[in-house]
Image (spheres, rainbow, N blue to C red):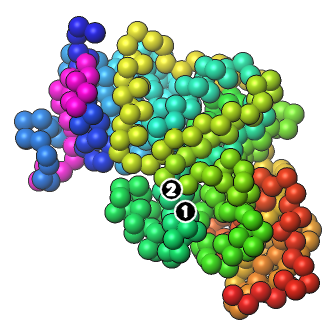
Amino acid sequence: MDKKIKTGLVGFGCVGQALYEIINAESLPFDVSRICVKNPGKARSLSEENFTYRYEELVNDPEIEVIVELIDDSEAAFKMVKQGLVAGKKVVTANKKMVAEHLEELMALKENGGKLWYEAAVCGGIPIVMTMDQFYNYEPIQEISGIFNGSSNFILTKIEQEGLDYHQALALAQKLGFAESNPLLDVGGYDTMNKLVILLCHAYGITTTPSSLSTIGIQHIASNDLDFARQRGLKIKLIAKAVRNNNLVHAYVMPCFVDANQDLGHVNNEFNAVLIKGKYTDEHLFTGKGAGGAPTAASVIADIYATIGKPDYDYYKWHDNREITYSNKVSLPVYLRYNHSAELNEFGFEHIWSEGRYKNGGFVVGEISLDNLWSLNAYIEQKGIVVVAASLLENPQRLFATKDQQTVAV
């Protein structure tokens, strides 16, 4: 490529700096001419002349072809991306919350001539969005499941393998740059939820809202729960899952039991994994690093390259979809650990198959409506209740307590 692509960068945090360093280290054909940042007084590794504090300078510069947005603030990011698209710019973003909350509007904005890529918004270094949009564009997708958040997976791995407590593992994840500035976005499942919303559009043609999905995090997982899993040859992972049944799709984000010998059971630390089950191609497993500046920056670079003479996403299934809808009307097998027995009354279990006591509180294994869990998301988080789905297990009955397990003193 003879001519360098003149690029404007918004944000110079972990990913922004990694992007700039990779471009220069690899002598890539991108000229990052201006970097828009928020705080003038902050010490940075580059000289002041590289920066601007006015986003309009990027939008109004006719020589800047591509604007790369890499900031945390989703609403500020949406205003910037919207302005860039209206101006006919090619825009690359890694802001999954912004894309998930405004996806349908962003798709409409591209009619002004702008183009949008967001591969880096979903699962870091795994090229899953373009793969879903192009390879699976005609394939009926039966199921999506996977580990979409490297920070939470790193934390659970350190707790399981090294015996760290939750707070120690979280502090280590933050020190290594794996966790978001607000850790609840990761451990609460919200980051994963936003990514799943984006994939629902490409996989099923559904544009739903993040608030429509049942979202339960790992922040209350404790030794009781991990011991329960370990005794049964299982691990606990934060899982995103979507299943199509006829013309209905249900989806959720929550901790799930995973067989230690299954594919997802081998995915540890900051790695992500996406398991796609197609009607004709059967199962494909995609794995790669899902946290850290460099893997995400690599996806951003792939998106910048994609702007060169290529169309952006086809959204074939969204344009073609006339029948498939989203619904939480399905039942799930779950393990639920409560602190006080009165809390169980809120959940309306359809069946309770097994139960036991801990020193503080207890647990039940049973079947519950996903709609109930969705309506109780805030209650679950507030009360510190733990819910772990068993829907990835071929035989959920392995969770049932035997007579000598009815009282578990841990």
Instruction: Label 2: state its secondary structure.
Output: loop
- Give the percent coordinates (x, y) of residue 69: 34, 36
Q: Is residue 98 visible?
A: no
* Range shown magenta: 24-41
Name the disc covering residue 124, or none: none
- Give the percent coordinates (x, y) of residue 371: 78, 56
- Give the percent coordinates (x, y) of residue 148: 57, 47
Image marks 1 and 2: residues in contact by CB distance under 8 Å: yes
Which residue is located at x 68 percent, y 47 percent? 263
Query: Which callout, 1 or 2, points at the residue further toward the start of the chain?
Result: 1
Which residue is located at x 49 percent, y 18 percent? 312
Residue 55 lies left or right of residue 126; in this view the side is: left
Residue type marked 2: Asn
**283 and 52: which is toward the camera:** 283
Residue 375, above or below 64: below
Residue type marked 1: Thr
Classify the position of the N terminus by image quarter.
Answer: top left
- Give the percent coordinates (x, y) of residue 48: 7, 41
Residue 214 lies left or right of residue 34; in this view the side is: right
Question: Residue 95 is drawn in which quadrant?
Answer: top left
Which residue is located at x 59 percent, y 44 percent? 273
Is residue 319 in the magenta section?
no
Q: List the residue tagged with mark 2.
A: 269
Is residue 31 in the magenta section?
yes
Residue 228, above or below 51: below
Residue 249, above or below 43: above
Q: List the residue tagged with mark 1.
A: 157
Instruction: Label 1: state its secondary structure.
Output: helix
Classify the position of the C terminus by image quarter.
Answer: bottom right
Residue 261, above or below 236: above
Residue 6 lies left or right of residue 406; in this view the side is: left
Question: Residue 356 is drawn in which quadrant?
Answer: bottom right
